[in-house]
Image (tube, grey):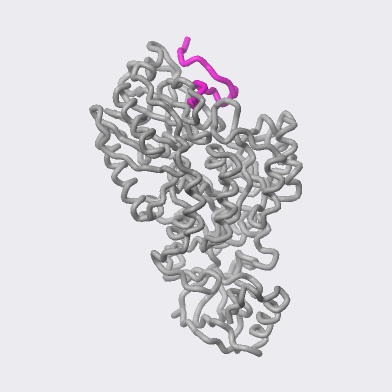
Amino acid sequence: MIASPAVTPRERLRQRLDAAMGRVPCDLIIRNARFLDVFSCRFREGELAIADGTIVGIEPGRSAHHTLDAGGRALVPGFIDAHVHIESSMLLPHAFAQAVLPRGTTAAVCDPHELANVVGTRGIRFFLEAAEHVPLDLFVMLSSCVPATALETNGGGSIGALDLAPLAAHPRAIGLAEVMNFPGVLHGDPAMLDKLALFCGRPIDGHAPLFGDTHLSAYATAGISSCHESSERKEAEEKLVRGLSVWIREGSVAKDLEALAPLLTLATSQTMGFCTDDRNPHDIAVEGHLDHLIRKAIDLGVMPEVAYRAASFSVARHYGLDRGAERIGAIAPGYKADLVLLDDIGRCAVHSVHKAGELVGEGAAYDHAGEAQAARDLLHTVRASVPEAEALLGPRGRVHVIGVVGGKLLTEARVMTSDDPDVRRLSVLERHGHGRPPANAYVTGFGPLRGAIASSVGHDSHNLIVVGDETRDMRAALAALIEMGGGFAVVRDGAVVARLALPYGGLMSDATPTALAHGLATLKAAGRAAGCTLDDPFLQLAFLSLPVIPTLKLTDHGLVDVDRFAIIDVRAP
């Protein structure tokens, strides 16, 4: 009884009611299953009846065209990623869905500000249009900070409230994305206030690492209602007590789950959820997506019912996705039949996934012709010239050094000598066609790297960033990025030993998830062979140019002291 798109909402409702009342057969009945009641946080016995992709009953007594015997397995609601940059998966939206749907992620709340910082509102429109066609439920938070700050050069120009207003009417636009310009909020910057006022009464995501006390209260007063940037339990508690939802992040670089898991209890689960933020296809293939976060949370002592509730209903309720005609986030009558059947609750072992009542095929291909056509508009965005090796030289002697902390976006501020054996060169090259010379500084934490590693993924403005021990190799790595139109490269002895092209916005590929996972594994192996000791040097490198997370970062404008929000001299007194 799949309703035709031409069926009116009234007729569709009547068809579902007929199935609920047993007047007509349902499409599917799932028997012999225990399902999670997210409202009481308990597993219950029941018989799920599904019609037109919607749950119409949880008790026995109906007939159906098809039945499924769950074999005593558990059913939980489909998982919802509370905050993700799909660009950071390096996958186009259809391929992202292909990678995560079989792992139980049936919905995602995305922020396209990575692409928006490269191509402006075109990037936001690309994701809004994709959201209407991808096989998972994709919701878009409209990017609030393009550019993120005035301390770097982007390619997307400045997106203001007037630019966002027409986009806000799109049915897949549900709120304002992470507000990184905290000085603008706290000091009442007019442009920032216009954006906040435009989304008054709608979800507004925060971005407030290490915030507390008066600053955090003022931030919440502005209407900001969530934050995914907590890396310490006390920090997260301060946000919860001020009414902010806390999304526990476990991405490919930032890993906060171990620190925050003790805070996730039955009492807090109504305002806590999970997000990946930035997770690459290799980690998705090897570890998983939200299923990995749930598994790890349970291993850390979180009650399974609480973990599954946080991964679904808590996020849905925060963003208002549990209301309207297409409710998600729960197993109950009137909710979309987004279901994950588990072989093992404690291990989050996914047996199968149903999206709107339809079985999700492992490795299924989806029609994405329209998306492919739209994506062509995202090519040729790297407009930089290859600099001379001498242009990548930084000052010598005592210098300020960025200290990388593995698994964290936060960095340390150190003073060292430029020829210290643990110090490597770091350069950022503006790539949006403005012709700025490279900005050069120093970094430690990459291990005994011999050669160079470069990336066109450089949050948030996505200029080219390269780390190395010799400027010759650094130049060769930058040249490889420019030739590919964006991507990653590893260079040793002047030769490119591994590369991966990301030509769409310099951020994404049209390759399959499997092919990209293999390419990343090859790059990681090349990085390790060059002496890099970081688990994911490419994403770690990408965040070294993000000047909104403390402490020291390097943008195309120079070395940024994030605490002071100012450019400082690389030379140290």
> The magenta stretch spans which residues?
552-573
Q: Count up the numbered dots.
A: 0
Percent x, y of residue 88: 47, 45
Where is residue 43? Give x, y as percent.
56, 72
Q: Residue at x 69, y 49 (%)?
A: 168
Question: Can you tell which quarter of the image residue 288 is in?
Answer: bottom left
Answer whether residue 306 is visible to the viewer in this image.
no
Q: Nearer the viewer, residue 99 or 284?
A: 99
Whether residue 82 is visible to the viewer of this picture, yes or no, is yes
Viewer-closest of 391 and 412: 391
Q: Indicate the position of residue 38 as horizontal and vertical percent values.
A: 61, 66
Q: Is residue 125 magenta?
A: no
Classify 321 as above or below 255.
below
Please identify the quarter of the rendering in which residue 176 is found.
top right
Pick the quarter of the image with the N terminus: bottom right
Residue at 61% x, 44% y is 227
Horizontal relation, residue 362 to residue 15: left or right = left
Name the residue nearer the viewer: 132 or 305.
132
**517 relative to 493, above or below:** below
Give the residue at x 50% y 14%.
569
562 within the magenta span: yes
Image position of 196 (left or right of 145): right
Placement of 319 over or under 43, stated as above or below: above
Please name whichever residue, 196 or 448, is drawn nearer the observer in this view of the structure.
Answer: 196
Instruction: Residue at 63% x, 88% y: name it.
Output: 24
